[in-house]
Image (cartoon, grey):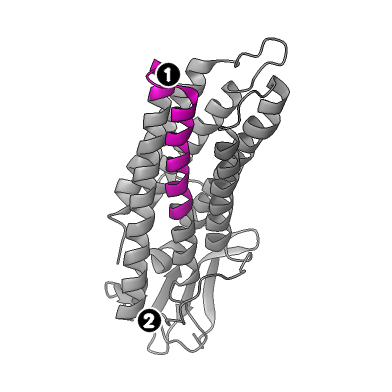
């Protein structure tokens, strides 16, 4: 923005909050999640006046709002389908192929939500040198490579996790597999996808807490991240319980596997509902 930086905050190589001195004696504060989700940064006038938010232009705000709605609704529907699939599996209301079909449909919505989240990061307004406390709208892009940004890395890992889950869900349609084949083709991708979801959630906490893990009770974004991470933990519990014992051909614990998926999916649906309220 042309003025010396007053403070940079974050964790490791990631910067999640920047504070600048403005020419008039005030300060401008850029926060990663606030800028990419709501298209805003905070400006405090000189002499201790109350800060206000400076918004990006209408083009950026419209982009962010539409992508946010797409991602949120996709996670709500995907979570609901996974919940239905787990309920059907637990209570024996359908055969394995029908369960796999429900899960696969849910996976398509999860992948859509993951990519929409990545697009929101890629097309978020940026702060630039000489910006004088403003956000600048760039041209629309379908892809970028920005691993030095924690928001990009978090959403890219999330999207990658949904793609790995797609492998697991496709392989679920295969029949006549041995226990070892089930573990290699279905269980292993499931676990890898869960690990990627957990990593994504950790990076999201780094972004919203600026590298210091803490509870932010009045921050909607924090609650969205926390509920999603709880869902990821429950998915991991489900995946561990779904390991097929080669000696017996049975799961470690089918009840835990189904209930872990069901409750984890509910978390993602609920977080999607909350996300609908996080817009510019």
Task: Name which quarter of the figure residue 131 lies in.
Answer: bottom left
The quadrant the C terminus occupies is bottom left
Q: In this rendering, which labeled residue sits more in front, label 1 or label 2?
A: 1
Residue 96 shown in magenta: yes
Question: How many numbered marks appear?
Answer: 2
Q: Position of residue 172 (x, y in %)?
A: 57, 32
Residue farthest toward the top in the current orientation of the protein: 248
Instruction: Provide the residue designation for mark 1.
Output: 90
Q: Is residue 241 visible?
A: yes
Q: Which residues are magenta?
A: 88-112
Q: Position of residue 269 (x, y in %)?
A: 35, 41
Tell me which numbered mark, 1 or 2, is placed earlier along the sequence.
2
Q: Are marks 1 and 2 in contact (CB under 8 Å)?
A: no
Residue name at image x 65 percent, y 14 percent: 249
Task: Name which quarter of the figure residue 116 lies in.
Answer: bottom left
Instruction: Provide the residue designation for mark 2.
Output: 26
Element carrying mark 2: loop
Q: Is residue 1 above or below residue 44?
A: below
């Amino acid at each position: 923005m042309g003025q010396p930086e007053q403070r940079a905050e974050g964790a490791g190589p990631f910067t999640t909050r920047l504070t600048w001195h403005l020419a008039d004696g005030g300060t401008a504060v850029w926060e990663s999640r606030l800028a990419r989700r709501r298209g805003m940064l905070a400006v405090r006038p000189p002499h201790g006046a109350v800060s206000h938010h400076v918004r990006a232009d209408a083009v950026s705000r419209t982009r962010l709002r539409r992508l946010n709605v797409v991602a949120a609704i996709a996670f709500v529907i995907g979570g609901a389908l996974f919940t239905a699939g787990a309920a059907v599996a637990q209570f024996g209301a359908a055969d394995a192929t029908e369960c796999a079909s429900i899960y696969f449909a849910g996976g398509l919505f999860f992948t859509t939500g993951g990519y929409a989240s990545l697009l929101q990061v890629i097309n978020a307004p940026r702060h630039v040198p000489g910006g004088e406390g403003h956000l600048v709208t760039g041209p629309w892009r379908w892809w970028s490579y920005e691993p030095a940004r924690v928001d990009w890395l978090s959403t890219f890992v999330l999207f990658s996790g949904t793609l790995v889950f797609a492998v697991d869900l496709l392989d679920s349609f295969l029949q006549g597999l041995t226990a070892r084949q089930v573990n290699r083709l279905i269980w292993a991708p499931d676990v890898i996808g869960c690990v990627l979801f957990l990593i994504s959630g950790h990076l999201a906490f780094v972004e919203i807490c600026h590298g210091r893990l803490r509870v932010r009770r009045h921050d909607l974004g924090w609650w969205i991240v926390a509920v999603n991470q709880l869902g990821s933990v429950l998915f991991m519990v489900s995946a561990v319980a779904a390991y097929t014992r080669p000696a017996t051909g049975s799961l470690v614990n089918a009840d835990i596997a189904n209930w872990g998926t069901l409750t984890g999916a509910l978390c993602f649906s609920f977080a999607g509902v909350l996300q609908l309220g996080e817009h510019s």
